[in-house]
Amino acid sequence: MLARPMRTDLLACPEDHTALREDGDLLRCEHGHEWPVRDGAPVFTAAVGGFERRAEWERKQENSVPEYEQEEADQQARRGTMAWTVGRLFGEFWSQPVGDAAKVLDVGCSVYAELPYRRPAERFVGVDPLPGSPAREYEFVQAFGERLPFAAGTFDVALLATSLDHVADPLAVLRECARAAPRVAIWIGIIEPGLDFGVLEALARVPREPLYRPRAAAAAARTLYALNAAPKDYADELHLHRFELIQMRELVAAAGLALERQMLITDYSQTTPHLFLDATR
């Protein structure tokens, strides 16, 4: 199965947002910027040069890719996970306000050919800096979320499905999404207030006895003391950020978006609960 080629009518130069014209295997704007097209996918990753945490972003992408590729190789196992089920719920969540006639932008679609949250739409376009599967069932553009290759208001809704905590600059990505679409829907795992990811993982290894018993209480105390003494880092080797609920609300507001709906799902399939947010410009 070949990837669905990206039609160029929705694209704009990420440098100046002017129209692009096709010239063989290149796309050019009126100001001379040019971008290659590879395997039917326009490539705009050169539009972002240096940005903060670039080296960390590249290292964590290298850590993530083997996991993504393994999931893509075993689609049957992927469809059987709780994350797939939550993804389908996110599809219901974002699609209710916009319907089937919407133009949809998925920022951070990763390497996957199939997405659990994709719903019928007039157009569904995925964006990711990783080239990913050659067999995507949707249109695809290789680009960074910090510099989207679309004019303002091109889409009806922009999605950030488990991707906002992987980007270098979450606020810049949210602002770009709000520029490209009047509605932004977010699916993200959030941390519990006051506990970072390491604390939650470490406490899961405490002996499974009631905490009032001396051995379990002592193990929990040692874990909390050791983690509290260490420098706080809400991220891990796959994510650049970890957000609490209040931080996500503040980030949405800073991007000029008004929160319309939210849904919190705790399924115990992972350490952090799932948060769905629906915000409008």
Image (cartoon, grey):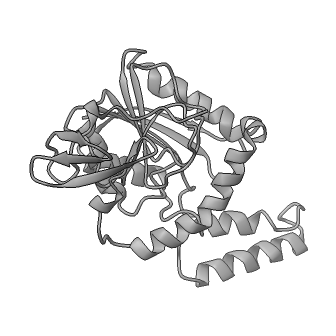
The spot of residue 202 in percent (x, y) is 73, 69
* Foreground residue among 67 and 28: 28
* Foreground residue among 133 and 248: 133
* Residue 52 visible, this angle: yes
The spot of residue 107 in percent (x, y) is 41, 44
Residue 209 located left or right of residue 6: right
Q: Is residue 103 above or below residue 171?
A: above
Residue 54 located left or right of residue 189: left
Judged from this view, the residue extending furthest toward the front is 24
* Foreground residue among 256 and 77: 77
Query: Residue 247, located in which quarter of the rendered image?
Result: bottom left
Give me the residue at 68% from left, 75% from top.
Answer: 224
| Quadrant in which the N terminus appears | top right
The spot of residue 194 in percent (x, y) is 54, 63
Query: Residue 78, located in which quarter of the rendered image?
Result: top right
Give me the residue at 66% from left, 60% from top.
Answer: 66
How many labels were placed on the picture?
Answer: 0
| Quadrant in which the C terminus appears | top left
* Residue 269 visible, this angle: no
Query: Residue 17, located in which quarter of the rendered image?
Result: top left
Residue 263 located left or right of residue 103: right
Give me the residue at 75% from left, 44% from top.
Answer: 74
The spot of residue 129 in percent (x, y) is 43, 55
Judged from this view, the residue extending furthest toward the left is 31
Give me the residue at 49% from left, 44% from top.
Answer: 109
